[in-house]
Image (cartoon, helix red, strand yellow):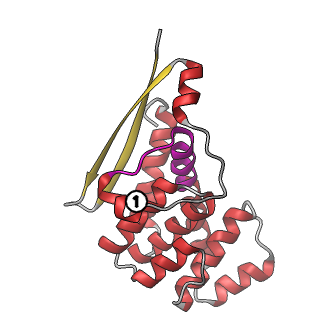
Amino acid sequence: MANSSGLLSTYVQGYDALRENSGFSPTKQEVILLTISRTNGCEYCMAAHSFLAGAMSGVPDNVIEAIRDGNSVPDKKLSALSIFTKVMVTKRGLPDRSEVESFLSAGYKETDILEIILAIAVKTISNYTNHLFHTEVDPVFSKYTWSDQQHMDVPLAHTCQEKKLHVTSQHNFNQENRNEDTKIFTLTRVE
């Protein structure tokens, strides 16, 4: 992301806005972010947000596992949130009126839908970047490694070799402040 200042600033500002101003509790935020990451098949974000969900956001283990496994979430309100988030991703922001009504009848507001759109934008930036660069799961998240067998896997080394690029990455995780910092990739042309 560091090679695109617009991408990086959009991600950071959006992520901060979601965390600080969405009105969703940390638990609900992680349900949303896990659901998006699973729907997009992002192995890195599934591992990272599974860790964050349990260690820092208070998401019950059975909720985390249900989302990771693609099963029904056992909590009714969190289930409605996860289902609607997945609908928004898979239907590219075109839910049926009945899906919107079902979400709203679970106790959510129309403004919550807008915050889900923000989360989708932020996670799509992160998920797609991780897909492109085949980001390896950091050791702190390795207990939560997850794999989506249905997405294509094109090795980054092969892609970079064809384009004569060298990839380095740096990731900072500030556990004390409970913030997830950005994983930064640098592409350098090899001559």
Residue 38 location (% of width, % of height): 57, 64
Q: What percent of the width, then of the height, locates residue 74?
A: 53, 89
Q: Which residue is mark 1?
A: 48
Give the structural element (helix, strand or loop) at label 1.
helix
Residue 10, given in percent of the width and then of the height, sits at 50, 44
Q: Position of residue 63 (x, y in %)?
A: 47, 81
**Residue placed most toward the observer, 52 or 158:** 158
Residue 108 showing in the rendered view: no
Q: Main secondary structure of the magenta part?
A: helix
Query: Is residue 17 visible in this depiction of the protein?
Result: yes
The vertical placement of 142 against 83, above or below, is: above
139 inside magenta stretch: no
- Rendered residue at 47%/68% (across/down): 22
- Going 74% across and 80% down the picture, which residue do you hit? 99
Which residue is located at x 59 percent, y 59 percent? 148
Amino acid type of the residue tagged 1 in the rendering: Ala
Question: Which portion, as a residue range, is magenta?
Answer: 122-138
* Closer to the camera in the image, 65 or 187: 65
In the figure, 93 relative to 69: above or below?
Answer: above
Name the foreground residue: 166 vs 59. 166
In the picture provided, is 6 more to the left or to the right than 58? right
**How many numbered marks are there?**
1
